[in-house]
Image: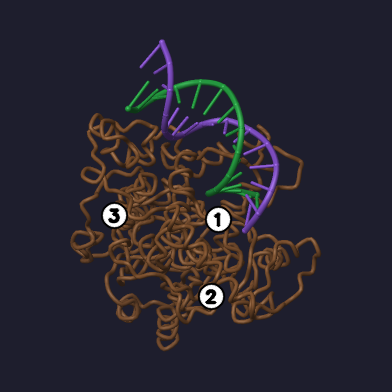
Chain colours: A brown, B green, C purple
Amino acid sequence: MAVTVHWFRHGLRLHDNPSLLAALEDAEEFYPVFIFDGEVAGTKICGYNRWKFLHECLQDLDNQLKEVGGRLYVFQGDPCEIFSTLFQEWGVKRLCFEQDPEPIWQPRDNAVKKLCEDNDVEWIERISHTLWNPKDVINQNGGSPPVTYMIFRHVTDGLGPPDKPVNDPDFSSVKLPLPEKFQFELPCLEKLAPERVCEEKKINGWIGGEKRGLELFESRIKVEQKAFKAGYCLPNQYQPDLLGPPMSLSPYLRFGCVSVRKFYWKIMEVFNEVSTEEPSYQLIAQLIWREYFYTMSVGNDKYDQMKENPICLNIPWYENETHLKKWQEGETGYPWIDACMKQLKIEGWIHHVSRHAVSCFLTRGDLWISWEEGFKMFLEHLLDADWSICAGNWMWISSSAFERALQCPKCFCPVRYGRRMDPSGAYIRRYLPVLKDMPLRYLFEPWKAPKAVQEKANCIVGKDYPLPIVNHKEASKKNYEMMEEVVSCLKKCAIPHCAPSDESEVRSFVWLPDHLAAGGRGCTANDICDGIAGM
DNA sequence: ATTGGGGTTGGAAAA
DNA sequence: ATTTTCCAACCCCAA
């Protein structure tokens, strides 16, 4: 019988929460704790929508705990200092928390573990943010992160399917002490970081928290079930729904409102109910990508930067503050790009085709600006961005790492790709109202509209809407040549690193130079920017 | 595998 | 009403 604490960081949920169960086991008194330390839950770089989402997650946890007679204890400050006080005050005997695999959290967690050891407090860390323990994947692979995505898949196949979700917590036999003097007011963004409250406090349709996450999950499962029954197949030239209400679970996976293991097993279950075929890997491909980027960041604290990052190509990107600013603000003069950036800033979530478009435009496609800038922008605004997933996706997109480093694909045309993804132009008109009367014909390249058309549409290009900041055709051609040069330099020093076991896989691989292969990898899948992957 | 590019063609919108 | 322009819809090919 003991006083125990569960420390929430990721994993803002009650279901499938093994470390929460560990905290409740044989406990006499139980305290659920969340600590704002200026970094937790991605609050170091955090736009308004992310703050709002996090607050809703915490509010939801507090509401659920109220129903079982408790409250969520919320603190602000350094975890070590706070726990040091709490251990004394509450007489804590056990501290439980979910594993945060990313390197950025290790100093914090190591310090707290040491504090526990110094104070004779048992600490328990459990895996539930990822499908597998990244450390198991690395061990299974012989001590280093898998060199390629294919190998990653192979290794995880070797580990077997991920653990099934654990039972819901039972609070009936523990005491949930209520505070006498402590205030449970969640610190609001306006007070904590007023400079981060942007003017764009728009309603975005996203509501944080486990309750909403599970509702969305259930409705999403029904959609998938229907698709399976109808004979699920991968869409070849599919039309993304850029205008519908948010359906992605990615923000809920990011904050742990919905368990990734629940997601995995439910999809499998639903598919198996409908079909006797072996479930396609594609069903959970995005979850595996998520897993891959988390795992690959383990032990690489330079994962979010180009310099000194063993897996990232050094590419001589331009430094162009003006271009960067225009990209960030959605003022590039390419309506498709600008609409995506406006939606990102206003709503905090954009579809993966939008992510493809703007990330390619910033980096290897048009502006030739480092992916690190895009990483920072996405990490600030995207509800589903997490440090390693965001950085991994940006390296991928910009052809800075993985097999992309040696096989740079064609870039997206900001006009043509937009036309295909948003054929009615409704998406652009929603996020760029200045273009609402521009005829569809010129909507994706309004600078080509004759003066009379511009006047009639009440939008003079160069005045009401910017002229394009670069000539796509010229810029992308030059950038492609520069990328080819980088690649040809690399190929000269490329040496076979390891032979693929399966002959059929050879096609998918490009040999990596040693310095890349050491911590690097290649992969063949595409479509990695889906919200689930959480770029 | 998925894009852009080149070619062609038919048709719609602009002039 | 006629001409011009340009785009969607094909195809195939290259990367």
Q: Which residue occupies 57% across, 68% down?
A: A405
Q: Gap in Å between the C-alphas at discs 3 and 1?
A: 25 Å
Res A298 label: 2
Res A329 label: 3
Relative to A373, is C9 on the left or the right? Answer: right
Q: Dot 2, crowdedness within 10 Å: few (<14), some or many (≥20)?
A: many
Q: Chain of mark 1?
A: A
Mark 1 and mark 2 on one chain: yes
Counting residues from the N terminus, which is met first, the one under dot 3 or under dot 2?
A: 2
Indicate which label's residue lies in the foreground, 1 or 2.
1
Res A332 label: none
Badge 2 amino acid: Val
- Examine the image and state in which quarter residue A177 appears: bottom left
Q: Which residue occupies 22% across, 64% down?
A: A193
The picture places residue A351, in percent across and down from the top left corner, at: 45, 47
Indicate which label's residue lies in the foreground, 3 or 1.
1
Q: Label 1: which residue?
A: A410
Badge 1 amino acid: Lys
Q: Gap in Å between the C-alphas at discs 1 and 2?
A: 31 Å
Q: Nearer the viewer, residue A354 or A456?
A: A456
- Examine the image and state in which quarter residue A485 appears: bottom right
The picture places residue A402, in percent across and down from the top left corner, at: 59, 68
Q: Does the CB distance between marks 3 and 1 fall below 8 Å? A: no
Q: Dot 3, crowdedness within 10 Å: few (<14), some or many (≥20)?
A: some
Badge 3 amino acid: Glu
Evaluate whether residue A456 shows in this view: yes
Q: Nearer the viewer, residue A414 or A389?
A: A414
- Examine the image and state in which quarter residue A52 appears: bottom left
